[in-house]
């Protein structure tokens, strides 16, 4: 049996942070928009958005050393750090607006203050960290960053890591007390509650989008299967956003737009060591990031993380890479082989050929056992005991592979908005910093798909109230930004900047 529903302005595919952010932003600026959200699982926020399945770090570039590369002349490039910092601040401004409007009622249910640290060992890395600190603190947004090579100071910052350290060991760390931990799973559930209860947006679960086809010159039709009854329904919309995490690529490949050509993806499973010893959990209140190994991808930066999940503080270490051909945790083992198409074979082969060290790294990761992982943990916690930790499989990440004229294909670390020329179809591919900068990414999607709205004077004023720096560089008005940042911290009940 098939039925047809028509006349949606926007269909969002996927029940995660991206679809929820886009739908909520649009309904807040234009309540009359007709929006439909489709999720293939029986609950929202179960894949990459789920608390156990992502890093839970409010990515602000305070501690992520891969966001501040060093060139051959020793100069540290902080341009990406400045960009990510500003993008996360937009997320915080949006959340504070929702709290002030009474739409979110308990900030502690999704965000906590957790200091962010970068920590390195050895003279070469200490010199890099010091230069990074000096470069970053020249910008006012990072002026409160602290740096220390003093063991006693670092013992105050993260005592669990400093326990039993040799006083002669060369190391250094930076600290930003403005750092946060975010439960994006809870936040996304809050978003969907607002959408369903306040704006009456239908959020249909157990609905898998099988195909997307053009319906005349203006609209698109989504073919949707009910995974409980098997019934097919066809929904028409002027715009379709594909925000289905790892599931976005296979669906995008079915859409008849030229811009999808050459895209591929490579799935990597995230895994964490999860601490079962509550005494240890209580001894660490920080996010401590170090440097990835020489052959490891940026997404593998090792870190020891305090997180709040289901109202309780947890302690995790990782990530470790696993391998599955699935693009989603609840996906199919055929996802990877079925994603290989004639147009992306050169991209896939080029990435494989030019990233042999990465292949070697992944093979090594996959072959690790519990003893090997605990040995890696002992770089951070010298007396770590295997029985205090167990392995948890986190979400699937699909790294973007793009066509490249010289190498055939390149591996992209980050997020990419792929869209049709007219903006009617938009799709989000990629991973970190992902959820942290969802608000900024969805503002970009709105600019592509609904440019006429963002040019409207009344809507601009609404966005200005919601996200004061939505279209401005914070360096244009330092005093105003600091006032906004302080108010945001107070509203979100964060400890720093009160």
Image (spheres, rainbow, N blue to C red):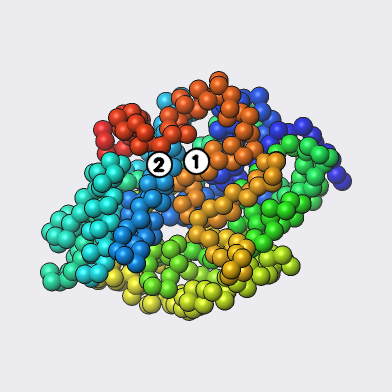
Residue occupying image coordinates x 52% and y 77%: 356
Could you say which quadrant of the image residue 275 lies in? bottom left
Quadrant for residue 317, please give it.
bottom left
The reply to whether dot 1 and dot 2 touch (C-beta < 8 Å) is: yes
Q: Position of 54 compared to 259: left or right?
A: left
- The answer to whether 456 appears left or right of 337 in the picture is left
Whole-percent x, y for residue 319 in the image: 42, 64
Q: Residues within 10 Å of mark 2 (few under 14, many from 20)?
A: many
Above or below, comparing residue 92 to residue 416 in the picture: above
Q: What's the CA distance linking mark 1 and mark 2? A: 9 Å
**Residue 444 in picture, x, y percent from top left:** 55, 40
- Residue at position x 63%, y 34% from top? 450
Check disc 1 and report the residue beneath it.
Answer: 440
Residue 207 spot, x, y in % from top left: 71, 47
Residue 414 position in % (x across, y down): 50, 55
| Mark nearer the N terminus (1 vs 2) | 2
Q: Specify the quadrant of the image occupied by residue 74.
A: bottom left
Residue 418 sits above or below residue 24 on the image: below
Q: Is residue 463 left or right of residue 80?
A: right
Foreground residue, 451 or 166? 451
Q: Which mark is residue 86?
A: 2
Quadrant of the image containing the C terminus: top left
- Residue found 59% across the figure and 41% down from its top: 445
Q: Is residue 182 visible?
A: no
Q: Secondary structure at mark 2?
A: helix
Task: State the residue in front, 77 or 26.
Answer: 77
């Amino acid at each position: 049996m098939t039925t047809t529903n028509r006349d949606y302005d926007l269909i969002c595919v996927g029940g995660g942070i991206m679809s929820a952010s886009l739908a909520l932003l649009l309904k807040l600026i234009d309540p009359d928009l007709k929006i439909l959200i489709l999720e293939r699982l029986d609950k929202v926020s179960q894949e990459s958005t789920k608390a156990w399945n992502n890093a839970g770090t409010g990515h602000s570039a305070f501690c992520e050393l891969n966001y501040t590369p060093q060139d051959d002349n020793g100069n540290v490039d902080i341009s990406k750090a400045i960009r990510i910092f500003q993008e996360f601040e937009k997320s915080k401004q949006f959340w504070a607006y929702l709290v002030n409007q009474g739409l979110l009622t308990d900030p502690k249910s999704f965000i906590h203050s957790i200091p962010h640290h970068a920590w390195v060992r050895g003279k070469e890395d200490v010199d890099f960290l010091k230069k990074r600190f000096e470069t970053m603190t020249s910008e006012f947004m990072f002026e409160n960053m602290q740096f220390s090579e003093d063991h006693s100071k670092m013992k105050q910052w993260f005592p669990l890591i400093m326990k039993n350290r040799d006083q002669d060991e060369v190391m250094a760390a930076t600290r930003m007390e403005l750092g946060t931990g975010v439960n994006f799973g809870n936040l996304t559930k809050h978003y969907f509650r607002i959408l369903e209860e306040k704006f009456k947006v239908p959020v249909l679960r157990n609905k898998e989008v099988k195909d997307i086809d053009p319906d005349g010159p203006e609209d698109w039709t989504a073919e949707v299967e009910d995974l409980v009854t098997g019934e097919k329904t066809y929904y028409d919309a002027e715009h379709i956003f594909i925000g289905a995490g790892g599931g976005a690529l296979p669906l995008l490949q079915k859409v008849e737009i030229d811009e999808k050509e050459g895209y591929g993806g490579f799935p990597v499973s995230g895994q964490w060591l999860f601490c079962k010893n509550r005494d240890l959990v209580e001894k660490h209140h920080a996010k401590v990031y170090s440097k990835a190994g020489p052959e490891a991808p940026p997404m593998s930066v090792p870190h020891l993380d305090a997180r709040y999940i289901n109202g309780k503080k947890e302690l995790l270490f990782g990530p470790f890479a696993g391998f599955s051909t699935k693009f989603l945790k609840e996906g199919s083992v055929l996802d990877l082989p079925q994603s290989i198409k004639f147009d992306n074979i050169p991209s896939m082969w080029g990435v494989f050929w030019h990233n042999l060290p990465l292949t070697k790294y992944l093979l090594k990761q996959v072959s690790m056992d519990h003893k090997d992982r605990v040995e890696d943990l002992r770089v951070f916690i010298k007396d770590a005991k295997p029985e205090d930790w167990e392995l948890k499989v986190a979400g699937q990440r699909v790294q973007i592979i793009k066509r490249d004229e010289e190498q055939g294909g390149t591996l992209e670390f980050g997020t990419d908005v792929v869209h049709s020329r007219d903006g009617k179809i938009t799709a989000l591919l990629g991973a970190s910093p992902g959820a942290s900068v969802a608000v900024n990414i969805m503002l970009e999607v709105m600019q592509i798909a609904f440019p006429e709205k963002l040019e409207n004077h009344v809507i601009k004023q609404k966005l200005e109230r919601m996200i004061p720096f939505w279209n401005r560089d914070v360096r244009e008005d330092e005093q105003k930004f600091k006032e906004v940042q302080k108010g945001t911290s107070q509203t979100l009940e964060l400890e720093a900047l009160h």
